Amino acid sequence: MNGIRLSDDKRLFVSYSFLKGNGVSEKLISKWSCRKSCVKKYFDLKPFIEYNSIPKSTLTKLPSESHLRSLLNEEQHNSQQEYYNNLLQEANEKDFINFKEEYKQDRRLTPEQITICAKLRAVWEKILKNNTGKRGETEFLFKAFTSIFKDKYKTYESFCVSKAKARNDINSVVIDARWFREHESSIN
C-alpha cells in the first residue's frame, strides 16, 4: 500500500497522507515534528512516521499494527501472483514460437496440436527456469498455470508430479499420449 511501508529492519511506517486519511490533523503531525517525539523516515522522497513512535492517544484512531501488516502481506502476495501470471502468460503468447518448429517435425501432430505443444513447452520451460525453490513459489506457478490451461491439472499435487516429470523429460508433459491411441470401434 502506498501509505504503509516496512523498513529494512521490518519496522512499520505510515505516511502523512495515511494519517490524515485516518483522522489525524496536520496540526497534530506538525506538533510531533516540533517535539521530535516520532521517528521519521523517507520512502521515495515522501515522509513516513514509524507506527510505534506515534503517541498512544493517536494510535487509537488508527488500524492496529497487525491489521496493517496483514494488508502489506496480502498486497505482496497479490503482486507476486501477478508477476508469475505475467511471466507464464508471456511464454504462452510469445515464447511458444521458439518451439513450434521442433513439434512440426513430429508428423503425428496436427497443426492445432503443434501449437498446443509449443505453448505448453514454452510455459513449462518458464516454470522450470523460474522455480528456484523459494517458499510458496510452486503454488504461485500452479495458479498461474491453471489461469492459462484451466483443465490441464485439477489439483496442486498433480501439477507437482508433472513438474517432476518435466525436469526429466519435458515432452512427457507436453505431448498428450492420448492423441495417438488407436480407437477401435466396439461395433463391427
Image (tube, rainbow, N blue to C red):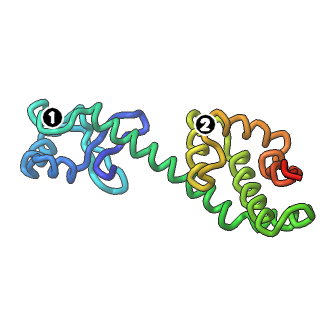
* Residue 102 in the image: above or below residue 52: below
Report, in whole angstroms, how far the alpha carbon at label 2 lies from the one at label 1: 42 Å
Q: Nearer the viewer, residue 93 or 33?
A: 93
Which residue is denoted by mark 1 in the rendering? 59
**Mark 1, residues whose alpha carbon is within 10 Å: few (<14), some, or many (≥20)?**
some
Label 2 secondary element: helix
Given residues 152 and 33, the one toward you in this image is 152
Where residue 115 sits in the image (x, y, percent)?
76, 65
Secondary structure of the residue carrying tag 1 is helix
For the residue marked with disc 2, what is the amino acid? Tyr
The residue to which callout 2 is attached is 156
Q: Earlier in the sequence, mark 2 or mark 1?
A: 1
The residue that appears at 32% across and 52% down in the rendered structure is 2
Q: Report crowding for label 2: few under 14, some 14 to 19, many 20 or more residues within 10 A (C-alpha).
A: some
Q: Which residue is at a point 79% across and 50% down the rendered structure image?
A: 176
Residue 108 point in image, percent of width and height: 90, 61
Choose mark 2 or mark 1, whichever is in front.
Answer: 2
Measuring 73% from the left and 40% from the top, which residue is drawn there? Answer: 163
Instruction: In the rendered structure, find residue 142 and report the number of the disc placed on it.
Output: none
Residue at the image point whose x is 72% and y is 35% from the top: 161
Is the C-beta separation of discs 2 and 1 under 8 Å? no
